[in-house]
Amino acid sequence: MSAALPRILRTSSFRLTLLYAALFGCSALILLGVIYGASGVYMSNSLDAAIDSDIAELEDSLRAGGNAALTAQIEERVRQTPNGPMYYSLQDADGKAIAGNIPFANGREGRFDLKVPRSNSPSVAVHAHGITLPDSEYLMVGVDALPRREIRKLIVRVFGWSSAITLMLAFASGALMSRGLLRRVETISRAARDIMAGDFSRRIPVRGTGDEFDHLVTSLNAMLDRNEAAMESVRQVSNDIAHDLRTPLTRLRQRLELAQRRAQSVAEWQRAAEGCISDMDATLQTFGALLRIAQIESGMPARRFTKIDLSELLHAVTEVYRPMAEEREQRFAADIASGLIFWGDRELLTQMAATRECNEAFAPREHPSHLRRCSRQMR
C-alpha cells in the first residue's frame, strides 16, 4: 500500500507534517469546545439578565396595582410584540391561562429552554424563567434564544473554515518541504553513485545555508577526502612495494643463479644460502617499514613513536659503517650535532639513516621510495 503512494507522501518530513496537523486539529477541537461553552454561558447570562429585568418590572406592577395591573402590563407588552422576542405566560393557581403569548405553560419553575410553536412558521427556541407569585399564580417570562444559537453557529462555522484552511496549508507546506528534502537527498545519492562508479574526487555541493544538511554534507565531504587520501596512500604503497622490492629480488635471483653455476661444494652453497637469507630479511624489513609508513599516513595512532635521542642514534649508525669504509680504504666522516631530540619510530629512523649513509659511502644511488616517504613523514 505504501509503495503505491507518491514518493513525497512517504517522506519523513511529510509524516511529521501530518503529525503536527493532527496535533493542531486536536488542539483546535479543544479550543472550539472551550469557546463554544464559554459563549453559551455568556449568552445565557445575557438572556437571563433581560428576563430578570422584565420579571422585576412585572413584580413592581403586581405590588403597585395588584393582579389587574400585572395582567394589563403583560397584555400591553404582548400587543406591542406579539411574535417576540419576549414571551409571557400568566396562569392562575389551577393552571388556566390569564394572559401572555405562549399558548401553554407547564408550571415549571427556574430557568429552562422550551420550544414555542408559531403559525405558518417554525417553532421558536425560547429561554425562559418561571416563578410562583405570592397569590399562587404562575408567571413565566422568556426571550428568543436565537442570538445564542446564531453565535454558536458562527463559532462553529469560523472554526470549521479556519481549521480546513490551516490543514490545507499544512499539507501544502509539508509537500513543499518534502520536495525540498527529496532534492537534497537525491543530490547526495547522485554524488554517492558517482563515487561508487569510480569518481573519487566527486564531492557533495554545500548550499551555504548553514542548516543541518550543510553540516551533514560538510562531514561527509571531510570523510570522502579522508577516504580518497587513504586510497591514494594504498596506491602509493603498492607502487613503492613494486619499486623497492625490484632491486632486492633481482639481487636474490642473481645470487641464486650465480650459486647454481659456480657453487662446487656444500660450503659455497651455505654461503649462497646465507646471502639469500640476508636478502630476504632485508626484503621483510622493507615490507614492515612500508606497512608502518602506511599506518602513519592513514592517520592511525603512532603507538611505536617515542622520544628519541637522534644524535646518539646517528653516532651508533656511523660506528657500524665506519669499519666497512676503512676496509675499502675510504674516508668516513660524520658531523652530528649534539642534543637532537626527536619524536618518531626508532627502527624507521635507523633504517633511513643507515641506508642513506651506506648509499652515500659505498653505492650512491637514489634512495628507496619508502625511505623517501619516511623522511617526509619524520620532518
Image: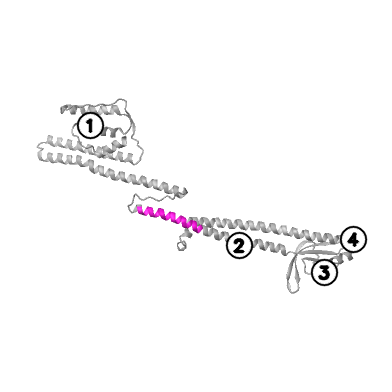
* Image quadrant where one finds the C terminus: top left
Residue at x 29% of width, y 27% of height: 311
Residue marked by disc 4: 64
Which amino acid, by three-letter code, is at mark 1? Answer: Glu
Which numbered disc, 3 or 1, marks the residue closer to the eye?
3
Q: Earlier in the sequence, mark 3 or mark 1?
A: 3
Q: How is the image coloured?
A: one colour
Q: Alpha-carbon distance for marks 4 and 1? A: 136 Å
Identity of the residue furthest to the front in this view? 208
Apparent side of residue 284 relative to residue 202 in the rendered image (left or right): left
Residue marked by disc 2: 161
Residue 245 at least partly seen = yes
40 lies above or below 344 = below
Q: Alpha-carbon distance for marks 2 and 1? A: 91 Å
**Which residues, given as a range, are shown in magenta?**
174-194
Which amino acid, by three-letter code, is at mark 3? Answer: Arg
Q: Earlier in the sequence, mark 3 or mark 2?
A: 3
Label 3 crowd (10 A; few <14 / some 14-19 / many >=20): few
155 lies above or below 265 = below
